[in-house]
Image (cartoon, grey):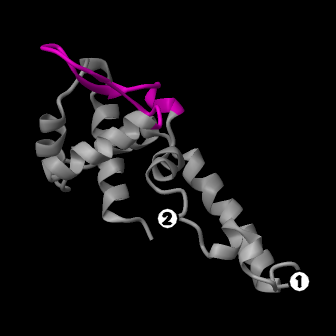
Amino acid sequence: MITRETDYAIRAMLYLAHHAGDGAISAATVAEAMDIPYRFLRRILSRLVGTNLLVSTRGKQGGLRLARDPEEVSLLDVVEAMDPEVITLNSCVLKSALCARSAYCAVHDELCRIQIYVNAELGAISLAKLVEHESGRNDDLPHTI
């Protein structure tokens, strides 16, 4: 299950992708626009900067911006930056050694197969694709950006 922290990270990254051409954006602006508690967001942004998904600049013209083009950042990148285990179906998928049965367990094999599929699907969804989807939504629907 995706945690609240990871959800907030996705929201923040999506906002920054939507405003990629606008220059650096303050954490306060992101927090307000995406309805994320500011203090919590600061910790999340720090982690995203530490994993090279964001660039942070200090000073009067400072703020945050994506480290790469929105087309080059996937949902999988963001999820893994926050917690690589958050989308793991079972601990044996991540570390086979945790279960003595994994070498012959049919469930383990199927979970590994599904995990590969989940990772591939998340990896195929870029921030640019999400921004495009958001921009094409009906104006009567609630927007997050």
The reply to whether the magenta stretch includes residue 110 is: no
**Could you say whether the residue bearing mark 1 is in a helix, strand or loop?**
loop
- In the image, 52: left or right of 32? right
Residue under numbered circle 1: 104
The residue lying at 11 percent from left, 44 percent from top is 32
Whole-percent x and y of residue 81? 48, 47
Disc 2 or 1, which lies upstream in sequence? 2
> Magenta residues, as a range?
51-72
Check the picture and name the quadrant holding the N terminus: bottom left
Residue 68 is tagged as none
Q: Foreground residue, 15 or 31? A: 31
Residue under numbered circle 2: 86
Q: Is residue 72 above or below residue 119?
A: above
Q: Quadrant of residue 42?
A: top left
Whole-percent x and y of residue 22? 24, 19
Q: Quadrant of residue 115?
A: bottom right
Q: Is residue 144 above or below residue 128?
A: below
Q: Is residue 144 visible?
A: no
Whole-percent x and y of residue 118? 61, 62
The amino acid type, in three-letter code, at marker 2 is Val
